[in-house]
Image (tube, rainbow, N blue to C red):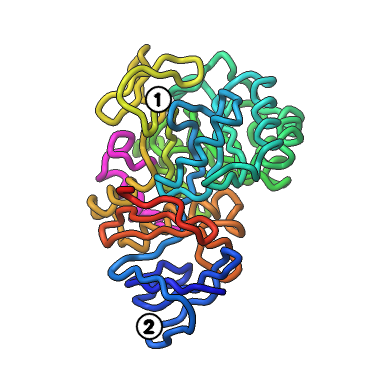
Amino acid sequence: MSEYVHAAKFFLPHAVETGGYLEVTAAGKFGAYLPEGVRPTGKIVEQSGRWIAPGLVDTHIHGLLGHDVMDNDWSGIAAMSQHLVEAGVTSWLPTTLTGSFEQLKAVCTTIADHAGEEPGAKIQGIYFEGPYFTTEHKGAQNPKYFKNPSVAEFNEWQSAAQGLVKKIAIAPERPGAVAFTQAVAAAGTVVALGHSDATFEQAKACVDAGATVFTHTFNGMSPLSHRAPGMVGTAMALEGVTDELICDGHHVRPEVATMLIRLVGPEHIALITDCMRAGMMPDGDYTLGEFAVYVKDGMARLKAGDSLAGSVLQLKDALSHLLAWGAGTPAAIVKMATQTPAASCGIQHRCGSILPGRAADYLVLDPNLHLLETHLDGALVYQAGH
């Protein structure tokens, strides 16, 4: 028998509804939304004064709780899924780092062999961050594995992943980048652009060939100048692209994040964490790929060179940060962590929206966008303070 969630606000795909009831079926699916004046027959779950939003979708995350996707350990990936619900995440893309062909293929095989078994946040695909990057903006990616794009190589990875590679990031200035983009995008995988010193013209050529995402915008890319727009200018200027954004207050200044959101709109901003294995862990020494990293004051940095090395951000905190920064309305902020990232990776038919028939993966928030509860398939899986 269905139950009905009664709350103060519902973030639905095409409107924010004040008051009312959201049906959750016995099968753990969303049913109908009913307005405040239409009290349904059945069990009422009172969430008085609270807001109901879709579960968050993290499409760029490397690690958590001491685990890293590149460890190629299913128990670690499963643990990430289990605890991501504490960050409000109900769907995610395990994200690789630049590595050898064989290492990346092995990770693909491991995830594909076990996907669907994870307890907690649902694996909706894999994100390949690299290895087709360039050294000028390498960040914490290992340049010894950098090389030119190869469709044949990618197809082997995709075969090992049983089609789960939903997105791959490349540097547009790499020889063959345009042809690679055209082939991979035409086959249904999203091509992102990042870790690159590309000119506006080089980046635009890849967008014209089918690239649609900019990887952690502002970070790891050629900056904006009034005569040389670079990668940042391309991310700002072109229509029909989505800009990833890390809103921990360290990777991008709040004023700059707010400026980009106002410029391109929430339907073109995908909030990500780029979280590494130190997420949900204390300060101290860690690794990212083959590099030594230290975590202090909410930042992960390479010991050699001191550049940022991913983040320790939880996606739930990006919501309250943006609200505090005045970067958008609550509805816009929720959209940037749900609908937009899902659509940016072609998984919007599976997650990111409250729609009848969809899995009832949803959050209970307070009016400051703080996470109170996470529900997965209609069941309570996390409650703050418990």
The quadrant of the image that shows the N terminus is bottom right
Residue 36: assigned label: 2
Q: Looking at the image, which is closer to me, 369 or 211?
A: 369
Q: Position of residue 140 (x, y in %)?
A: 45, 22
Q: Residue at x 58, y 19 (%)?
A: 146
Q: Position of residue 238 (x, y in %)?
A: 48, 50
Q: Residue at x 72, y 42 (%)?
A: 163
Q: Relative to 182, say whether 343 is above or below.
A: below
Q: Which residue range is magenta in the image?
A: 246-269
Q: Residues within 10 Å of mark 1 (few under 14, many from 20)?
A: many
Q: Classify residue 355 by image quadrant.
A: bottom right
Q: Relative to 107, say whether 38 is above or below.
A: below
Q: Looking at the image, which is closer to me, 267 or 297?
A: 297
Q: Secondary structure at mark 2?
A: loop
Question: Which residue bears the numbered disc 1?
Answer: 309
Q: Looking at the image, which is closer to me, 240 or 367?
A: 367
